[in-house]
Image (cartoon, grey):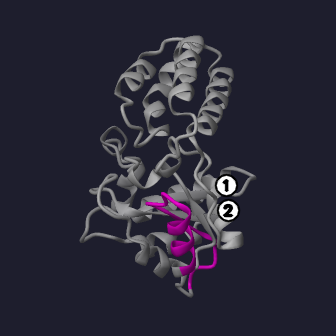
Amino acid sequence: MPHEKIIRHGAGAAMLQDLPKMQQMAAEIVKAVNLPVTAKTRLGWTETNKPIMEAAERLQDAGIAALAIHGRTRDQLYTGQADWTLIGEVKNNPKIHIPIIGNGDITNAQKAKYFFEQTGVDALMIGRGAIGRPWLFKEVKYHLETGELLPPPNVAQVVEILREQIRLNLEWKDNEHTGILMLRRHFAKYFPGLPNFRELKIKLLRGDTSDEVNCILDEIVDNFGSYQLDYSISNIL
């Protein structure tokens, strides 16, 4: 993790400043458990300090079973573009034999296919791109298998998916208020580009109970049910 509250304790992305310690910690974890251990790291600390190649080799030597690489430095946090060139260099390093998983900026099926083919990584990891768009995984899988694109869902279809996410989240949290609060920040991201949506958006973000939220979702379907959403203008990133 790149956040200050993590790195000030020498954890998360701070480990990129002490690769021997990273390797030692990984080795101890591998020895302590009977399950495969994987790791995820960034390219490095700053634009001029990207020790990802050495980090990957050290983690492999420590016994890590697979490595996910986010194509940004700690300094970037979540700004700028992910550098998939370096991810590809790690994957194609003849010294690396463990699976390499690429991560960063996968916001649509076309990007996923491009990164996958250009780098040769063993798998893709999708994070923020799926916020408000959990069907992205299905779109990526379909495009990789067929070369074709699935049509984006309309608002009525998105609402049904959101209702399911609300139901599952409430089951997980076992507390309605907490479950709704956790999802609030994601609600608006389900509906990018809707015209004259501000009033309903505010109501949606202020809903306190599942019944209240579902009533607002009914209004959204009544007003925009057949509207085709345009995720090219989404502010996911």
Q: Quadrant of residue 172?
A: top right
Q: Position of residue 14 (x, y in %)?
A: 35, 53
* Stretch of the chain drawn in magenta: 95-117
Q: How would you rate the neighbour count of disc 1 (Cα within 10 Å): few for under 14, some for 14-19, many for 20 or more?
A: few
18 displayed left or right of 57: left
Q: Secondary structure at mark 1?
A: helix
Q: Quadrant of residue 196?
A: top left
Amino acid of disc 1: Lys
The residue to which callout 2 is attached is 141
Residue 18 visible from this viewpoint: no
Q: Verify whether residue 99 appears in magenta.
A: yes
Residue 29 visible in rendering: yes
Residue at image point 58% right, 52% down: 152
State the residue at coordinates (42%, 23%): 200
39 left or right of 74 in image: right
Determine whether 193 is above or below 94 in the image. Answer: above
| Total marks in image | 2
Q: Is residue 18 above or below residue 164?
A: below
Point 66% across, 70% down: residue:
144
Whether the residues at callouts 1 and 2 have beta carbons within 8 Å, the answer is: yes
Q: What whole-number distance in Å separates the C-alpha atoms at marks 1 and 2?
A: 5 Å
Q: Amino acid at mark 2?
A: Lys
Question: Which one is nearer the viewer's eye here, 201 or 185?
Answer: 201
Q: Position of residue 167 (x, y in %)?
A: 67, 24
Say left or right for 24 vs 157: left
- Residue 105: x and y in percent read 43, 60
Which residue, as the protein is rendered here, is positioned at the far bottom? 94
Q: Which one is nearer the viewer's eye here, 91 or 120?
A: 120
Q: Which residue is mark 1?
A: 138
Q: Position of residue 8 (x, y in %)?
A: 30, 42
Q: Is residue 16 above or below residue 230?
A: below
